[in-house]
Amino acid sequence: MILLEVCANSIMSAMAAQEGGAQRVELCADLNEGGTTPSPGQISIAREKLHIKLYVLIRPRGSDFLYSDIEFKTMLADVQYCIDVGCDGIVTGILKADGTVDKERCTQLVQLAKQAGLGATFHRAFDMCVDQFQALEDIIDMGFERVLTSGGRSTAIEGSRAIAELVKKADGRISIMAGSGVAEINVADLILFTGVKEIHGTLLTRVKSKMQYNNDHIVMGSNYGDEYAYEVTSVDRVRNVLFKANEKPF
């Protein structure tokens, strides 16, 4: 059985992931920034609504993964909040300026989570490392459960060869979870090429606003487009990806 984790940008997306059959949710905000830590309200209400596993992204901002002392202190506080409200795990990662894993800080985050019974995933900061094989060994040593990766490329399909090598290198010591660009059309090939047992995707669909009045003379955000539409995870897409992922080839 292939496990599907949905990267949920809202409580609505998290609930859609659950309804579609996903086994785990990674709750985050600001997908256009690559994901940041969601609000306390989002986390606590998601915990109330979900019976599947809830992991929360611990990332104070977009851009790189090199954080200041204040940002790291914020990350520790966010992990503690996740513990307090009963989340199942965290998703995080910190790098040094030279592209290596910041083992000292990551270890503090992982140990704080693990001491309270939470799991930990190292996210796609891994794809920005200078040496993925060394980073993998560091992440295993620190006690992470899994690595989320696209193989150092923009999409998991593009990085499938590297992901397959990471699966072999991991040799069952840690789970390699493929993510980025995972969809109905490519998930079966991705699993076949790489040998991963876990996949990760947003599986979004665009939803029109129910607003009756629209002000067409203003742009509220930095992304130009329809101000009266938003993206949410699709129940049908989740079901379809799970079906394709677990369909037996002839």
Image: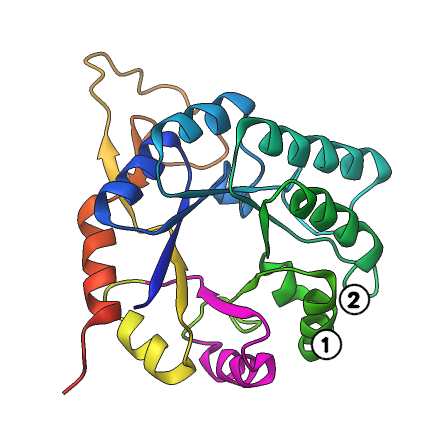
Give the amino acid type for the residue marked by disc 2 in the picture: Thr
Labelled disc at residue 131: 1
Magenta span contains residue 169: yes
Residue 126's spot in the image, x, y percent?
A: 64, 64
- The range drawn in magenta is 158-182
Give the mark nearer the N terminus: 2 vs 1: 2
Residue 81 occupies which quadrant of the picture? top right
At mark 2, the secondary structure is: loop
At mark 1, the secondary structure is: loop
Q: Which residue is mark 2?
A: 100
Residue 125's spot in the image, x, y percent?
A: 64, 59
Distance, label 2 to label 1, CA atoms, is 7 Å
Q: Please say if 77 is above or below 213.
A: below
Q: Residue at x 61, y 66 (%)?
A: 127
Give the amino acid type for the residue marked by disc 1 in the picture: Asp
**Direction top: furthest residue:** 213
Residue 11 occupies which quadrant of the picture? top left
| Left or right for 179, reference 192 | right
Of 237 and 208, the residue lying toward us = 237
Quarter placement of the N terminus: bottom left
